[in-house]
C-alpha cells in the first residue's frame, strides 16, 4: 500500500508540467560589436517572437535571445546580412524546460517550513519557511506583510534585527522578474545564514537586514505552473497581461529603455506604480528611507553588478564610491570559486533603462548605495543554473553581500 501510494505520488508529480510549450524555440547568443548593430538588435525587443533573456549591457558582450520557430530563419538571415556573430546554444528550449521539470518535481518533497538550496521552492514553501523563522526565532526575525499581490498573495518581508531602533538597514529584494528563479534562493540564503547560523550573529548587531525574497509572487507562481519564462506581473491587459515591475517605478518613468506596448517584456505599465507589488516596495522604502543605507535588487542573469543611473548615461556624483564598493563585492565573490562580475554604471552600458527600483531608491528615497545584481546564468542548461548548483551560487554570493554589511558599518555607523 505504501509502495502504491509512493508510485501514485511520483506519477502525479511527473504528470504536471507547464501549460505553455516552447517546442522548437531556440536560444541564440548574439554579440553586437558596434552601436549600430546593438541598435538594430534592440528593435526586436518589442516583437513577440523574441524574448531577450539577458539585457544589452556593453558592446562585444553577448546577449541571449530566445526566438520562436516562425522567426528563426529570418532572424538568422538578418544576422548574417548584418555581419552579427551568433551561436545557437539551445536547439530546443522545451527540452531544457522538461529536463528542469523533472528535477524540479523533487521540490514538492520539501517539508513545510524547511528551506532548500537543492531545488527551486514554490512561493507557499518560501512563506512557510519565513513563518517558521518568525515563530522559532521571534527575538531576531520578524515577518511583515507589506501588501497583497494582484492575485491576492501576501507580500512577505522579513526583518532580521537584534532590536533597538534607528539602525542602518540593508534592504534586499528578489524576483521582481518572475522567471529569475536563482534570485529567491540567494535572498533565502542570506535569511538562513543570519537567522539559523549562530556564527553570523555579529552581522545583525549593529545593522538590520530587511529582505523581500519574492517581490512578484503571482508571476513567480505562473512561471512554475503555466509559462516557465514569464517575467512580468500578472495584471491583465487588453491584449497581453503583465507589467515589468522593474520599469514601473516613478523616477524618469518611460523615459528610455522601457516599452509602452503591453505585450513587450519591458512594458512599463499604464502609469507609474500601476502595480500593487511596486507600490508595496515604494511604501516600505519611503517609510524607512532615513535608515535604509543599501537597496539591492537581485536579478538574473549575466554576472553584472550595476549602480545608477539607469535612465541616463551621466554618472551619479558618488560613482567612484559605488564603483569601489562594487569592486570589493566582486572580489569577495571571486575569491570563493572564481566567479566574476562586471561592475559598472550607465557609462559603460549600452542602453539606459528607466523606471527601475534602484534608480527610484537613489533618486527619490535618497539611498546612496543602490545596486542591481544580475546573478550567473544557466547557459546551455536553460534560463537558470541547474538546481544542483544553487548551493554554490548562494554561497559565493553571500560572501559578496557580507561586504555590503561591512561597508555600511564603516560608512554610516560611526557617524550616528
Ligand atoms: Zn531581471
Image (tube, helix red, strand yellow):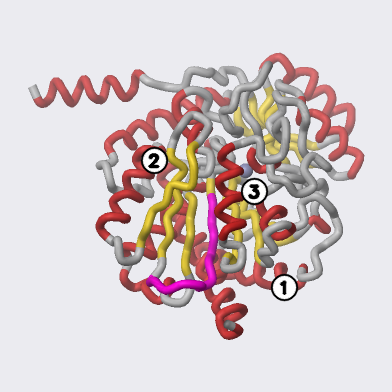
Dividing the image into four quarters, tell me where ligand 1 lies: top right
| 167 within the magenta span | yes
Query: What residue is at 59 percent from the left and 56 percent from the top?
Result: 285
| Residue 302, numbered label | 3
Residue closest to the eye, 312 or 330: 312
Mark linked to residue 321: 1
Q: Determine which quarter of the picture holds residue 70.
A: top right
Where is residue 190 drawn, in percent x and y?
44, 59
Helix or strand or loop: what does disc 2 sit on?
loop
Q: 10 Å neighbourhood of mark 3: few (<14), some, or many (≥20)?
A: many
Q: Quadrant of the N terminus?
A: top left
Foreground residue among 82 and 294: 294
Stretch of the chain drawn in magenta: 162-173
Q: Is residue 415 visible?
A: yes
Please give the label number shown on residue 121.
2
**Left or right: 155, with 242 as reference point:** left
At 31% from the left edge and 24% from the top edge, which residue is drawn?
A: 13
Amino acid at each position: 500500500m505504501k509502495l502504491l501510494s509512493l508510485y501514485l505520488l511520483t506519477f502525479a508529480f511527473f504528470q504536471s508540467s507547464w501549460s505553455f510549450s516552447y517546442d522548437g524555440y531556440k536560444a541564440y547568443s548574439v554579440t553586437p560589436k558596434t552601436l549600430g548593430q546593438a541598435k538594430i538588435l534592440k528593435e526586436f525587443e518589442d516583437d513577440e517572437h523574441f524574448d531577450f533573456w539577458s539585457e544589452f549591457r556593453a558592446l562585444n558582450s553577448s546577449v541571449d535571445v530566445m526566438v520562436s520557430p516562425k522567426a528563426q530563419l529570418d532572424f538568422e538571415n538578418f544576422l548574417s546580412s548584418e555581419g552579427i556573430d551568433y551561436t545557437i546554444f539551445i536547439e530546443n528550449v522545451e527540452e531544457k524546460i522538461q529536463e528542469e521539470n523533472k528535477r524540479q518535481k523533487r521540490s514538492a518533497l520539501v517539508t513545510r517550513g524547511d528551506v532548500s538550496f537543492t531545488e527551486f521552492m514554490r512561493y507557499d514553501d518560501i512563506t512557510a519557511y519565513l513563518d517558521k523563522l518568525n515563530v522559532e526565532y521571534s527575538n531576531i526575525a520578524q515577518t511583515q506583510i507589506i501588501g497583497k499581490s494582484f492575485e491576492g498573495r501576501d507580500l512577505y518581508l522579513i526583518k532580521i534585527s537584534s532590536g533597538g531602533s534607528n539602525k542602518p538597514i540593508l534592504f534586499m529584494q528578489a524576483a521582481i522578474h518572475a522567471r529569475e528563479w536563482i534570485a529567491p534562493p540567494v535572498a533565502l540564503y542570506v535569511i538562513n545564514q543570519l537567522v539559523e547560523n549562530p556564527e553570523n550573529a555579529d552581522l545583525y548587531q549593529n545593522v538590520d537586514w530587511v529582505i523581500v525574497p519574492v517581490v512578484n509572487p503571482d508571476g513567480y507562481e505562473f512561471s512554475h505552473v503555466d509559462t516557465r519564462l514569464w517575467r512580468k506581473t500578472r495584471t491583465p491587459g487588453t491584449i497581453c497581461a503583465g507589467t515589468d515591475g522593474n520599469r514601473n517605478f516613478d523616477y524618469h518613468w518611460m523615459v528610455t529603455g522601457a516599452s509602452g506596448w503591453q505585450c513587450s517584456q519591458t512594458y512599463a505599465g499604464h502609469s507609474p506604480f500601476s502595480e500593487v507589488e511596486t507600490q508595496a516596495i515604494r511604501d516600505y522604502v519611503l517609510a524607512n528611507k532615513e535608515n535604509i543605507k543599501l537597496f539591492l535588487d537581485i536579478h538574473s542573469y549575466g554576472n553584472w553588478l550595476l549602480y545608477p543611473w539607469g535612465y541616463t548615461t551621466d554618472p551619479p556624483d558618488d560613482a567612484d564610491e559605488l564603483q569601489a564598493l562594487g569592486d570589493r563585492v566582486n572580489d569577495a565573490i571571486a575569491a570563493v570559486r572564481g566567479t566574476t562580475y562586471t561592475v559598472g554604471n550607465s557609462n559603460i552600458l549600452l542602453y539606459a533603462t528607466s523606471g527601475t527600483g534602484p534608480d527610484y531608491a537613489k533618486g527619490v528615497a535618497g539611498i546612496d548605495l543602490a545596486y542591481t545584481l544580475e546573478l550567473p546564468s544557466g547557459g546551455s542548461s536553460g534560463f537558470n543554473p541547474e538546481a544542483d548548483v544553487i548551493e554554490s551560487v548562494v554561497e559565493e554570493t553571500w560572501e559578496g553581500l557580507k561586504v555590503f554589511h561591512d561597508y555600511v558599518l564603516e560608512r554610516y555607523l560611526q557617524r550616528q
